[in-house]
């Protein structure tokens, strides 16, 4: 990784064929009232007018281009090439309120032992604001066990010390989805994830090109939990909690496979639900 600049926040925006919404994300990063920042856009092999859009920003942003390898590889490249001591992730279909970075930077200044924090969010679905369900409510601190069932950390809401990637590893490039769920579990089993209870991130969903719409998320969550159990880093209570959720997700996914005529795959996950196994 490159030499780090103290207090600089490196904003990493991965994108693939998102020219239709990317400008909003970049503009919200450029509009931040926190000036110690760099903005890195990683074009993951786009074939739409993304490059023409990015060219218009000239030296306001750094642009990295790679062949299409997925969002994890794009984020990882941006992180590896970044110069800041802090990393702030921003998905290309999301946006920030103008004081998002300054609010999180102030939190880290006041809490020098903290490694990662996230803000609350405004959710937009199909152009309309919606309220998150009770199960999506974020907590602050040691969030590992509630995070097993569903992802309670949003990439676009996060700021973290870059050194945390040295300790926990990067995004898993083998995961087309749930790569964030996987990283947050690796972090949160022994690291508090703090919440700034102010909605400073605008999270947009409901469009057809979202990765989560085209892949089974439970399949990758199952693999993530299994990898974590087998890494032997969990406490006995955490391991039991992880095992319980692992078996539950295996059963749910197996039933879904059976309903869709994928009997062999379903039988495999039913077997995993009966014992820890490996997939």
Image (cartoon, rainbow, N blue to C red):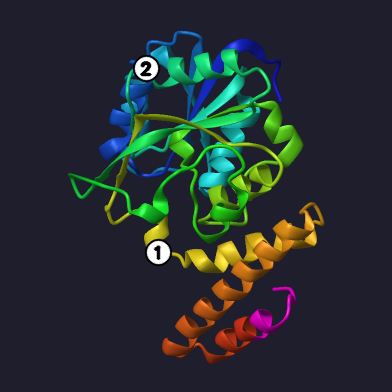
The image quarter in which residue 192 lies = top right
Q: CA distance from mark 1 to mark 2?
A: 34 Å
Label 2's element? Answer: loop
Extreme-right residue of the structure: 232
Q: Is residue 275 magenta?
A: yes
Q: Position of residue 72 (x, y in %)?
A: 56, 45
Q: Position of residue 261 (x, y in %)?
A: 45, 90
In the image, residue 188 above or below residue 11:
below
Callout 1: few (<14), some (14-19), or many (20+) C-alpha neighbours within 10 Å?
few
Please name the residue shown 57% across and 62% down the image. Answer: 221
Q: Quadrant of the N terminus?
A: top right
Give the labeled residue for mark 2: 99
Residue 211 within the segment the image draws in magenta: no
First to last magenta residue range: 271-279
Tag 1–tag 2 contact (CB < 8 Å): no
Secondary structure at numbered mark 1:
loop
- Toward which corner of the image does residue 58 lie, by quadrant? top left
In the image, residue 171 sits, relative to residue 247, either above or below, namely: above
Residue beneath label 1, please? 214
Whole-percent x and y of residue 246? 62, 69
Q: Residue 163, how many percent across, how many down?
A: 71, 27
Q: Is residue 52 visible?
A: no
In the picture, measured across the screen, residue 46 lies left or right of residue 65, that is left
Looking at the rendered image, the quarter that the C terminus falls into is bottom right
Residue that appears at 51% across and 34% down: 65
Name the residue rendered at 62%, 46% in the picture. Answer: 183
Query: Is residue 169 placed above or below 85 in the rendered structure?
Result: below
Q: Which marked residue is nearer to the observer: mark 1 or mark 2?
A: 2
In the image, taking residue 198 as reference, residue 242 lies left or right, namely right
Circle 2 packing at 10 Å, graded few (<14), some (14-19), many (20+), is some
């Amino acid at each position: 990784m490159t030499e780090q600049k103290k207090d600089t926040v490196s904003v990493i925006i991965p994108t693939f064929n998102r020219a239709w919404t990317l400008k909003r994300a970049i503009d919200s990063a450029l509009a931040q009232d926190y000036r110690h920042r760099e903005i890195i856009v990683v074009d993951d092999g786009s074939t739409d007018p993304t490059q023409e859009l990015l060219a218009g920003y000239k030296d306001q942003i750094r642009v990295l281009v790679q062949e299409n390898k997925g969002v994890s590889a794009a984020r990882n490249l941006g992180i590896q090439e970044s110069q800041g001591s802090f990393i702030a992730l921003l998905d290309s279909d999301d946006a920030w309120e103008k004081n998002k970075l300054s609010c999180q930077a102030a939190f880290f200044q006041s809490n020098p032992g903290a490694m990662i924090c996230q803000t609350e969010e405004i959710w937009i679905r199909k152009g309309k604001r919606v309220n998150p369900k009770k199960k999506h409510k974020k907590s602050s601190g040691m969030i590992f066990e509630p995070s097993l069932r569903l992802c309670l950390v949003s990439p676009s809401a996060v700021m973290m010390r870059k050194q945390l990637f040295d300790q926990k590893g990067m995004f898993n490039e083998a995961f087309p989805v749930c790569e964030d769920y996987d990283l947050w579990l690796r972090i949160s089993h022994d690291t508090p994830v703090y919440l700034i209870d102010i909605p400073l991130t605008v999270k947009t969903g409901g469009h057809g090109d979202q990765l989560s719409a085209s892949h089974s998320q439970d399949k990758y969550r199952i693999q993530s939990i299994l990898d974590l159990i087998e890494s032997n880093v969990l406490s006995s209570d955490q391991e039991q909690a992880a095992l319980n959720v692992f078996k539950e997700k295996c059963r749910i996914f197996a039933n879904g496979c059976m309903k869709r005529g994928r009997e062999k795959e379903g039988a495999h996950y039913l077997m995993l639900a009966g014992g820890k196994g490996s997939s």
